[in-house]
Amino acid sequence: MRSAYVINPAGIIRAIVWYPMNAGRSVDELLRLVAALQAVEREDASAPEGWRPGDALVEQAPAAHGEDEHLREGETWYFREKRA
């Protein structure tokens, strides 16, 4: 197995990706992963599958009932996009 590690400036491992020896690694995917980790840290949000820089992130769902009182028109408590 070959591994790729993403470590933040504080020395914390943020992601580990394993690849079998007989399959190539995608540098583009690793760069997308780093960009996603930076964006979600900066915006306090989550990146959906296939996220690319410039795409909307997903806001964290409220932890308690009542935190969803400030919904905008057409939003739901469980899925809200957030522009990075």
Image (tube, helix red, strand yellow):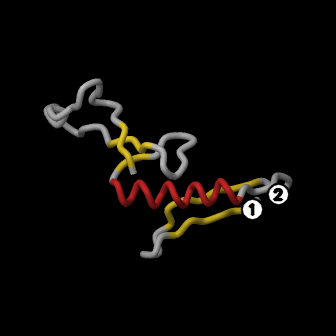
The numbered mark at residue 21 is 2
* Quarter residue 76 falls in: top left
Label 1 sits on a secondary structure element that is: strand
Instruction: Describe the element under mark 2 as helix, strand or loop.
Output: loop
Closest to the observer, 55 or 64: 55
- Residue 22 pos. (x, y %): 86, 53
Q: Horizontal and vertical percent for residue 27?
A: 70, 60
CA–CA distance in space, label 2 to label 1: 6 Å
Q: Which mark is on residue 2?
A: 1
Residue 79 image position (x, y, % from top left): 35, 32
Residue 82 placement, left or right of 14: left
Q: How crowded is mark 1: few (under 14 residues within 10 Å), some or many (20 or more)?
A: few
In the visual, does 12 lie left or right of 16? left
Identified by mark 2, the residue type is Met
Residue at 53%, 45% in the rendered image? 51
Q: Is residue 15 above or below residue 67?
A: below
User: Most extreme residue toward the top, as rendered?
Assistant: 74
At label 1, which amino acid type do we have? Answer: Arg
Q: Which of 73 and 27 is in front in this view?
A: 73
Whether label 2 touches label 1, CB < 8 Å? yes
In the picture, measured across the screen, residue 64 lies left or right of residue 14, that is: left
